[in-house]
Amino acid sequence: MELSPFDTEQLGIKTLEKSLIKPESRKSLRIGLPKETSPDERRISLTPGGVSILTANGHEIVVEKNAGIDAHFSDSEYQEAGAEISYSAEELFSKSEMIVKVAPPTRTELNWMQPNQILLSALHLGNTTAEFMHSIIEKGICAIGYEFIKGKDNEFPIVRMMHEITGSMAVQIAAHYLENNSNGQGIMLGGISGIPPATVAILGAGITGEYAARTALGYGAQVFVLDNDLAQLRRLENALDRRIITATANHQYLSTALSVSDVVIGAAMTEGERAPCWVTDSMVQSMKPGSVIVDTVIDQGGCISSSVPTTHSNPVYTRYDVVHYCVPNIPSNVARTATHALNNVIVPYLIDLGDAGGIQQCLWNNTALRNGTYTYKKHLTKKALAELFDMPFRDIEVLIASQI
């Protein structure tokens, strides 16, 4: 029975339990989960529950000591789920057939990776170098990027879930920084009897914008959403029962919206491209003192001209009397929720890989993983990456069909 990750999102663990029927052709994998070493990365890709399902399917899971500690999953929980705890990251990399992690491998981790290993992680295109790509290709690593995984329905399941978290968190963050203790205006997002609510302007009507709007409405705020895609605005109006005010993102409407807003959520983006910069410094200067900007697309350059990247350890700065929150990796600050979200999508893919009897047959059968693959059999398989790094590429379907 083919297991779809999209069924998992709707039905949760009950769907995963159906996968315990083992076809004769299945293959056991030794999967390594290293502790993330990237700054501010607190997530891990699999929960103990996910590990339990994978071990029940015959896979061996090796978890580096304290890999889940920041998401509040203990080593003992992973051991009880059937995982082996490794006290050496280098040994974990050397003895695993597949590495599953959140951030791309660091230079040190890349040196530890073995020829023909499978890597499942984010790629973080904005920070990727030609040197990284050449190293992955030279080792013959089959690399699958979270941000490229796209199913038959044209949805990006992992990207979508992280955007949902980001949108909801952006409003929660803004509410905190509006408080006096955070040098904000000292107001609540939602009004109380006799006092109007705060005004929230959301730039972009995509998934991040939608979940920001839903959360802001839940707080009781007045919500503006601006975008140049009228179909997206129409979809969002219908989805939220016209409880939001929409406008095209032209200079006039942007200037007006920012001048009256207490919070601006920057969520304007185009997949695979730099974020469009819609807001000028003069627009930011027109905002009320103590207002808050949360630029959720700062990892793609930001859509507000006064935005510069910050970190979870030092998340805000004030410019033009406006508090700016520009942390690139917002979901990492709710590591437990984000880990559950990653787990729910990733576990069915790993079961699919084992059931298919190997990576080649799995990529042939599984549209999402095939779309997610960016290096295979010492070839770059993404045209966009080939153009970015001026490297040759081969179509993955041709590579699989030719059994190279």
Image (spheres, rainbow, N blue to C red):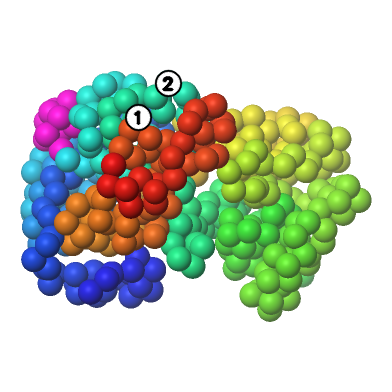
- Residue 367, position as x, y percentages in the image: 39, 60
At label 1, the amino acid type is: Ile
Q: Quadrant of the C terminus?
A: top left
Measured along the vertical axis of the image, is residue 13 above or below residue 180? below
Looking at this rendering, what residue extends furthest in the front direction? 402
Q: Is residue 227 left or right of residue 351?
A: right
Q: What span is colored magenta in the figure?
A: 86-96
Residue 391 or 103: which is nearer the viewer? 391
Q: Which residue is mark 2?
A: 131
Whether residue 345 appears in magenta in the rendering, the answer is no
Measured along the vertical axis of the image, is residue 176 above or below residue 227? above
- Residue 317, position as x, y percentages in the image: 64, 30
Marked residue nearer the N-terminal end (2 or 1): 2
Q: Is residue 221 visible?
A: no
Q: Is residue 117 left or right of residue 333?
A: left
Q: Residue at x 33, y 33 (%)?
A: 378
At label 2, the amino acid type is: Glu
Looking at this rendering, what residue extends furthest in the right direction? 252
Q: Quadrant of residue 18?
A: bottom left
